[in-house]
Amino acid sequence: MKLNSIKNSWKVWMTAGLAAIIFTQSACRKNLLDQNPTTVVDASTFWKSESDATTALVGAYASVAPLFTRDYFWEGNGDYIEVRGSGTHATDVRQGAAFNSSYDYKPTGNGAGSDKMYQYLFGGVNRTNYVIENVQKMLPHASAASLPGLEAVVGEARLLRGLVYFRLISLWGDVPYIDHIITSATEADTMTRMPIAQIKDRIIEDFTYAFEKLPATAPMLGRAAKPAALALRGKMHLYWACWNKNGWPELAGFTPDAAAATASYQAAEADFKSVINDYGLTLFRNGEPGQIDALGKADILPNYYHLFMPIANGDKEMVFSFTHGGINTALGEELMRDFGGRTQEFGQCWLSPRFEIADRYQSIVTGDYMPKLIPINPATPGARTLPNSAINPQSYANRDYRMKSTILWDNEMIIGLASLKSTGYAPYIYKTWGGNVTIGGVNYITYLTDGTTSGYVFRKFVRNYPGQGRSEGDYSWPVVRLADVFLMYAEATNELNGPQADAIALVNRIRHRGNLPALAADKVADKNAFFNAIEQERIIELVGEGQRSYDIRRWRALSRIYGPPGGPGVQTKDTHNENQELLFQNTQERGYEQYYIFRIPPSERNRNQRLTQNTPWL
């Protein structure tokens, strides 16, 4: 779909969404002197047609999408991306008000900073319930011609509700479950937390209904179809399997069950297999690596880079995505603002890769890890030519194509953008911000940012063409990508059967995107080895997409990454060998527990005394 048609489609949808929001708000008001409002749609004249139902559905999408389109902030809770804040405006949901703008998303101390997200997620539940309940009332009176469309609207709304509740239980465990319109403050303030197992069943029911009622292909960009419902149901099964296999001791009343884990891995396998085989989905540009430019050049970037540009909107790899409006809509995405530096339309570089991720990019020759990079003070004689020096550009040769697509290291080029025009190439040189430099006889102004403390910045998600401001992007944020489904399928089957041929082949297809050779025999020798290979691909393939911290939680990998509670922790560095953050030093068990489960917001408990608190936060 061309750029203009995407923008125009979004405008139509958002106009309808605003109408739905106005309607929803008016329907909740009490009658005033028995007068009908004259400036909003009255409920008695709405909910009459499939068009009305679809309009209300768009309002639900408008409410839910902003809760997920900046999931990259969660990467700060992981181990490979530094997030120094969320750069949001507290009054603007589109800008990510569900994220706390005064909160740095770090691996430590994160569970107390997401109160807004809890509240906004329940706002999404309310909006979806409004659609579900009212459209369900239309079903008994619907004509045979309109019934499938109305049921599909309910299916999409239930898929959105399931998605929101999936997020709620992933972070808070037991939460109140609401499946109807709340009209009484008394009811809202007296709800109790439903056990997570019961909510999981409701989520599965929502995704199953959506699968049964949705079409095989979405009616337009940004809406859900059968593969989305299956992928999300499979993911819920996978998480439930992990929680039962690995335990969740921080969640009071949760008892792991090995049999439940096995059954859920099997259910996940079946759902993922169907997504992979039954709907004609393929990786972007058939998973081919594409061409790559020489070190220090960026005229030709691999296909993985373009996967995160608007050219990939609607691609078959995008199993489910949320759209953005683009130019002049006030509904653009913030990727350039959050991932780019001042060199790109005065981006703010809220996120940057940690030094440690560079060593995860493997050799395209051997298919394995390369010698670890050596952080070194640039004043050291020969520092920029020393083999394996982190500031020697040649140390990055012959690596996974996804590296050049994802990050910048010293002397890598990126297009500068200002006032909607290109300013030409800017070389990135850590801590040499906006300076004059000559490379190959050409004068340049170096990359300008003070946002990174690692030595690297992102190329992934950062546009390299003019015409759009930092907050005017129209890239459709991927909620589920086919590559993720490949990896989740491999994980589920590995837990059940160890490495199996079809799963190995799928992982190798993802590796091929980075121009890597197939996994060597020792990488698929047993269940543990193959799990490590799957984790490696999840780190590299999904970096910056908001997945890593959730993987750490469901695998209970915190001690594996940072050492046991009370230990020395991990000292992060930058490419200049300067110490940065010291993570989990002397952190006691309670600090680890608070990573695995977030606190119920105190403001919610103050309003509702029946809400219990998660044990690590007592």
Image (cartoon, helix red, strand yellow):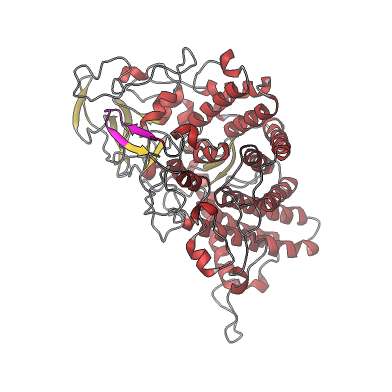
Residue 464's place in the image compared with 402, above or below, is below
**Coordinates of residue 114 in the picture (x, y in percent):** 47, 53
**Residue 123 visible in this rendered orientation of the protein:** yes
Residue 184's place in the image compared with 262, above or below, is below
Who's the residue at 53% across and 31% down the image?
538
Nearer-the-camera pick, 285 or 196? 196
Is 98 in the magenta?
no
Which segment did they paint magenta?
A: 567-580
Residue 188's place in the image compared with 115, above or below, is below
Splitting the image into 4 quarters, where does residue 190 fall? bottom right
Who's the residue at 60% across and 57% down the image?
175
Locate the N terminus by quadrant: top right
Is 574 in the magenta?
yes
**Residue 307 visible in this rendered orientation of the protein:** no
Left or right of 219 in this view: 2: left
* Number of dots carrying numbers: 0
**Coordinates of residue 397 in the picture (x, y in percent):** 37, 17
**Coordinates of residue 584 in the picture (x, y in percent):** 40, 39
**Coordinates of residue 479 in the picture (x, y in percent):** 56, 42
Nearer-the-camera pick, 355 or 346? 355
Nearer-the-camera pick, 1 or 598? 598
Nearer-the-camera pick, 403 or 14? 403
